[in-house]
Structure formats: structure tokens, C-alpha cells
Amino acid sequence: MPIPADASGRTAYELDRAHVFHSWSAQKALDPIVIAGGEGSYLWDADGKRYLDFSSQLVYTNIGHQHPRVVAAIKAQADVLCTIAPAHANDRRSLAAKLIVDVAPEGMNKVFFTNGGAEAVENAIRMARLHTGRTKIMSAYRSYHGATATAIQVTGDPRRWPNEFAPAGTVHFFGPFLYRSVFHATTEQEECERALAHLEQTILFEGPATVAAIVLESVPGTSGIMPPPAGYLAGVRELCDRFGIVMICDEVMSGFGRTGSWFAVDHYGVTPDLITFAKGVNSGYVPMGGVVIHDDIAATFDERAYPGGLTYSGHPLAAAAAVETILAMHDEEVVANAARVGSEVLGPGLRELAERHPSIGDVRGLGVFWALELVADRETKEPLAPYGGASPAVNGVLAAARDAGLLLFNQYHRIHVVPPCNLSDDEAREGLAILDDALSVADAAVLRA
Ligand code: PMP
């Protein structure tokens, strides 16, 4: 077969449909946009149509597309050394580790590098099991931790269901979520106390001496962006300390500025034993993830070998991108910008939309990390799409937004507003205005019912 010289536009679309096997999808009905380029908060397709990227792709371009400093750093590193195995030291990798540790909580001084989030979770779990000599892992039902074997087993949400091939040694529990409280709580404080009591009972009935780790997203992301009530993470920390359980905070999505702090745990003053990260560490310009390791866990492997590793761990191109991303985030005060845009523009703007759109049941979030919960009925809170599924009404909102030049992140009946951390106020307002119009599709479905 002749190889097409130009794979842009129509050719790229056709080659994609013929040969690219896409994630999480039935392959037949797909209709991807051919993205040709991007800059900052915008992308454009092969026909030159522009899109404001309120998805940050899969919630990872925290410094936007094509940040010139990061692009230059990747090019410069490519000229020097494209790759080196993990056993050697490399200046970009060393510096990336130092910069990551500097923004992590006190006492967390080592970084194990991976190629993404799921591998970070796999390795954090391995560390916890080896450190405690126990096997069981506890995690929240409303959670996502990645699509590799163990990471999908600890994932609580419906993406786990078709993936349960083997006995898992995992136990799920309910985290706090006042809007749909399974504890019949009416205040955040009640929700917090009852969720902690439920977690304590679950540990006691599982047998504390069998539980190696509790893994939880500091602010659950794809399961609905549910900032925990004040005191919840501190309560989990206390239970972990009491029962000798390793506390793993998964910050793959919430880390590196997304919530308006470097790590989401910073809002709650909690130091976990292990933090998993990926995505925002270098805005996904080159794949990278990892585990930030507390000194207490790191010491387990001072004399004893750590039985795990990855060929591309700490890859120099990814590390060069991480170094420059973190430096640019410091210089440009990107984290503070995420906090400010969230509290001054996005949060108030989304709450104002909720006043006018009957399809919005709940608005929650912080920083540039917001969810709209779309419901068929505000009283019953019946979701506008089934748990684990899709609906024409929600798809209609996404399509209307896309037609008007706005990309959103969607999970089941929820729309996630997750733009880059360096979004400007004007860009935030532009996206809110398009979303405002697109939501009329969901309102129409609600009013018809
Ligand atoms: N943990 C969390 C909290 C995530 O949001 C994700 C990805 N959405 C992962 C883990 C898995 O990361 P990756 O897709 O890079 O393997």
C-alpha cells in the first residue's frame, strides 16, 4: 500500500478510523476531531476551526498547549540526550525529582518515576504491601485509579466492572459525598463523621492486620470532583496511623495546580505516606508519572531491593519537560492563578448557571476542577444519564458545546469544567457563555419529561 505523504485532515481521519484502536470505546461509532495544533487554552482542527479546551484533554494540560518554555526544553534535551536507562543518573531526572519533592509535603523526599498514572498506583500499592507485609488494599467506590490490572481492581467506579478477571484482595468503601449521601447526612460535618465511622468499621471487619493500604484520590476526579469535607483526610490519616496502614493519596489528576495548590492534600494539611502523580507534572507533553515517597517508606528499601522498575522510568525528555513546567508554574504563578480563577470566575459563574438551568442538580469544585451534576429532577436527583452510561441529553450538551467551539470533559451524567491552570478570566467567561447555551439541550430534556 502506498504511504500517504500527507496525513492531515481527511486522510488522518480515515487512517485513524481504519487503524487506530481507541480507548474505552466501541470502535464502530467513533467520530474523532482531527486536531492539528494548539496554543495555550485553544486547539484547532484540520479545517482551522478553533476550540477552547475546557477539558485540558484528559485533565492534564495544566499549563495549556505548546507552552514555549517547555517546548524549547524538550527540543534542547533532544539535542543533548534523548534517552538513558533508569540505572544511570541524569541531570534532568535529578532536577525533576528535586523540584517535585520541593512542592510535596514535608518528609516526602524520594520520587519513583513511571510513565503515567496507573503505573504510579501499581507501584505505590507494591510499596505499601512490601512495607507492611500485608496484602489487602482499600479504596473508595467513587474512584478511578487507572486501567492496569491492580489499578483497575482498586478503581471503584463502573470502569472496574468489565475488568474483574481475577480475585483482587481489594475492598471498597464509601467516601464522603453530601449531595448523594449514603449516610443520610445533612451537613458536611455529619457526612465527614459518618464516612469516617463507616471506614473504621470496614477496617475492623476486614481485620486491620490484613490491610496494607488505603488508596484514595485527595479530591476524587473522574468520579465527580468531590472535595472532601474539612477533617476527612485528617481522619483517614488518624485511622491509618492507628492501624499501621499505608495512606496513599492518588493525585494523578488533582496534583500540580489543578485544585489551586500544588497538591490537593495541601488544602487539608495532611501528609500521606505515598502520593501518586502524573498528568500535570509536565502537562503530559511527554508521558511521565510517579510516586512521591515518605522517608518512613523509603527506608524500607534502603537495604532491601525494591522489586519493580520500568524501562523508561525518569525518561530525560519527560524529565526535561517536568523541570521546565514546574519552573514556569513558579515563575508565572500558575497555581495561584488556578485558585483565583476558580474562586472569582469559574465557581461563581457555574453557580449562576445552576440558578437558571433546571438540569443542573449540583455544582462543586475548587481551583480549575469543577463538576456539574446533570439531573432529570432536582428533587429526586435522578441522574440525566445512568450510572456508568450515557444519554442523548448529556451527549447533546457536549455536541452543542463542541459545535460552538468548546471542549468539555464528561463522565456519565456529569460535565467537568477542567481548563488549564493558567486560563485567563476572559477565556473562563468565553467558555461559560458557550456552556450556558449548550445546557439548554439538557434543560429541554428535563422539561419534556
Ligand atoms: N489516578 C487518577 C486519579 C486518574 O485520574 C487517572 C487518569 N485519569 C489515573 C490514576 C490513571 O492515569 P493514566 O491514565 O496516566 O494511567
Image (spheres, helix red, strand yellow):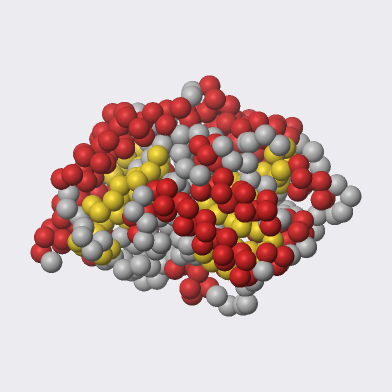
Foreground of the two, 395 or 174:
174
Residue 31 x/y as whole percent:
33, 61
Residue 384 x/y as whole percent:
25, 63
Among the 4 quarters of the image, the one containing residue 441: bottom left
Q: Is residue 191 left or right of residue 239?
A: left
Foreground of the two, 18 or 338:
338
- Compared to 135, does 81 lie above or below? above
At 20% across and 51% down in the image, what residue appears? 439
Residue 393 x/y as whole percent:
22, 61
At 15% across and 61% down in the image, what residue appears? 446
The mark tally for this picture is 0
Q: Is residue 346 left or right of residue 167?
A: left
Does the rendering let one see residue 1? no
Q: Is residue 210 left or right of residue 160?
A: right
Does the rendering let one see residue 202? yes
Residue 358 x/y as whole percent:
17, 53
For the C terminus, the image quarter is bottom left
At 40% across and 71% down in the image, what residue appears? 26
Q: Residue furthest left?
A: 448
At 27% across and 35% down in the image, what residue appears? 348
